[in-house]
Amino acid sequence: MYETITLANGIRIIHYRVKSDVAHCCMLMNTGTRDEDERQLGMAHFTEHMLFKGTRKRKAYHLLNRMESVGGEVDAYTTKEETCVSSSFLVEFYERAIELLNDVVFNSVFPQREIEKECDVIVDEINTYKDNPSENIFDEFESSMYANHPLGHNILGTKKSISKFKTADFLDFTKSKYNTDQMVFCSIGDIDFRRLVRLCEKHFGQNAASLRTFSRVSFPDSVKFDKVVKKKGMQANTIIGNYCYSYSNPKRVPMFLVSNILAGPGMNSRLNMQLREHHGLSYNIESNYTTYQDTGLFSIFFSSDHEKVDFAVDMIFRELDNMRTRKMGVLQLSRAKKQLIGQVAIESSSYSNLLFPTAKSFMNYGKAETFKETVALIEAITADDVMEVANEIFVRDKFSSIKYL
């Protein structure tokens, strides 16, 4: 059972007590790439890197060794809408982990010398993505779908933009964007909630409240495009997709089921069976559904021989049309639900995997669903729900595409 509380400065705490020698915690901040302006491209991601490069009381070496010297781990990630810093550790080191997360989030000083060194690291990261067409195509597709909008910003930024960042830029960014009322501290481990709250108040509670005063630029427009990019390589890479539901739209639940039916991780997905098993068109095909605050994105990616791309696209749309016109039978729908429920159960069986979805759910919805509640949402999906979302999203004339040929 989850327990929650909000500190006086607005930081929200959610805890799930479990019997385990290992604990996990994270600080999730509702700040990501879409919160950058045109002068800050890549700032959110760069800041995540710089959080462990020095604070008011520790140098980079001491920050990295604080948890690892006792067998723990620290990690961080950045997306379009969030930044997260996390740690996994033996239960006895709970306070050490909380104190460290507080130190890096609230006390980082962003030394200029470290900025210049880390810039080279991120440039190498950018080059790595550019050298991998099957990765780079996702960034280009999303940037094109959200052109001229902050959601279209590449998370890594550009070589030109990140080379200009100074210490003052990071301090300004964190002061204005790392708002305490937009932070969630999530804990999963064997610690009494009252003790956890005391530790959070001792460390996180010492920080002054910083309330968000800006609103995100909404995404009201849409574009339609079909791009062909010439690339050197043995394989062609293709993405097709359309705008979809935001994370606040109840239709997101049947949409996740539909995406899983089409090309989820199961080898028995419809598109894997059609393109790979029946026709040998593609070794790798997957569907992705990403939700944001005010929009969403559904896409299908596949790799294939160059001469098979168009035929594969036609096969995909044939299956999408089937979703729109043929109502799923009772047994068919039941099997699809059981598959998704099983995948959720396996993913949730690892407490480390449960940490981030729990934090994100509490951030977005003010609650974290239990496994039983998630199952109930999936079980409530009807065949009519599936057809409704399919007919709203799978309209071929509204799909955009990028082909790396």
Image: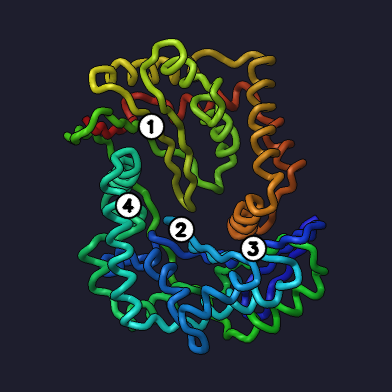
SS class, disc 4? helix
Mark 1 to mark 2: distance in Å?
Answer: 23 Å
Task: Report the residue at 64% width, 13% height from top.
Answer: 329
Lower position in the chain sequence, tag 1 or tag 3? 3
**Residue 71, image x, y percentages:** 64, 67
Occupied quadrant, residue 38: bottom left
Q: Give the amino acid type for the residue marked by disc 3 in the picture.
A: Ser
**Residue 220, image x, y percentages:** 36, 49
Q: Which residue is mark 3?
A: 88
Q: Answer whether labels 3 and 4 touch (C-beta < 8 Å).
A: no
Occupied quadrant, residue 182: bottom right
Residue 301's mark?
A: 1
Mark 1 to mark 3: distance in Å?
Answer: 33 Å
Occupied quadrant, residue 364: bottom right
Q: Closer to the camera, 120 or 110? A: 120
Lower position in the chain sequence, tag 4 or tag 2? 2
**Residue 274, image x, y percentages:** 45, 15
Mark 4 to mark 2: distance in Å?
Answer: 12 Å
